[in-house]
Image: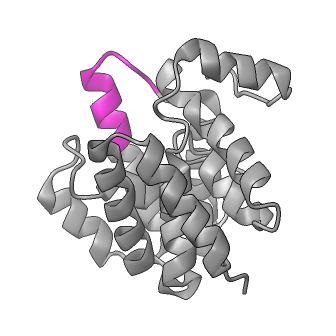
Amino acid sequence: MYEVSEEDLKRTEDLCYNTLLPRRMLHCLSCGEVLYRLHPSIGKANARVLALLHDIAHHYTREQLLSIIDKEHLVLEKGERELTVLLHAPVGAFIARTMIPSLPNEFVNAIRRHTVPHPDMNSVSYALFVADIIEPTRPFITDSERQKIYDMQSDKKRILYSIRCQEKYLKSTGGKQLDCTLALVKKLEEEASCAL
């Protein structure tokens, strides 16, 4: 399995400490610990780099994000452009790929998909999305929901339940899931029913 170099880890840490707000940095570091707990085979250094890079563009303005998206021809999902809070994921994936060219596609995909679940996700993507949702500083999930997710033994069950928690939160704020997330839910539910 891929292992991030010490040099790339140090460069990532330096960049994040110098650009992210302390609260965002705390979230990223905590997310790395949760990611490693959920998916230990990924390795501590890889989990840390993924967690740090997943929000590397979170502090950018809408104009900055759209400028990079348009200049680099980054593909957005239907409905993603309208929601500024989602735009840091494709830009973060682009930054991660540019910063660490050796980063595996599954890691770049995990950064890309950490805000909007999509049918092209894999186990690393599932784990990063779930880690981002259940990380302890997150206010929109209860401790009992968090523990229920930790107790689950399947990545697919974890992401389905996490998507349900996200959906509950979105409904409370007037938001809704994007079509690609609904497609992933349908795919996972069909796989689960075929396995019975």
Q: How far across and how far down the image is residue 107, in percent?
A: 68, 63
Q: How far across and how far down the image is residue 175, in percent?
A: 39, 20
Q: Residue at x 80, y 19 (%)?
A: 70
Q: Is residue 117 above or below residue 69?
A: below
Query: Which corner quadrant holds the N terminus?
Result: bottom right
> Where are the magenta residues, as a range?
166-176
Residue 171 on the magenta span: yes
Q: Is residue 18 above or below residue 148?
A: above
Q: Residue at x 35, y 70 (%)?
A: 34
- By secondary structure, the bulk of the magenta-drawn segment is best described as helix
Query: Is 68 placed left or right of 54 in the picture?
Result: right
Quarter of the image where one finds residue 67: top right
Q: Nearer the viewer, residue 145 or 50?
A: 50
Residue 156 on the magenta span: no
Residue 16 in view of the camera: yes
Residue 123 in view of the camera: no
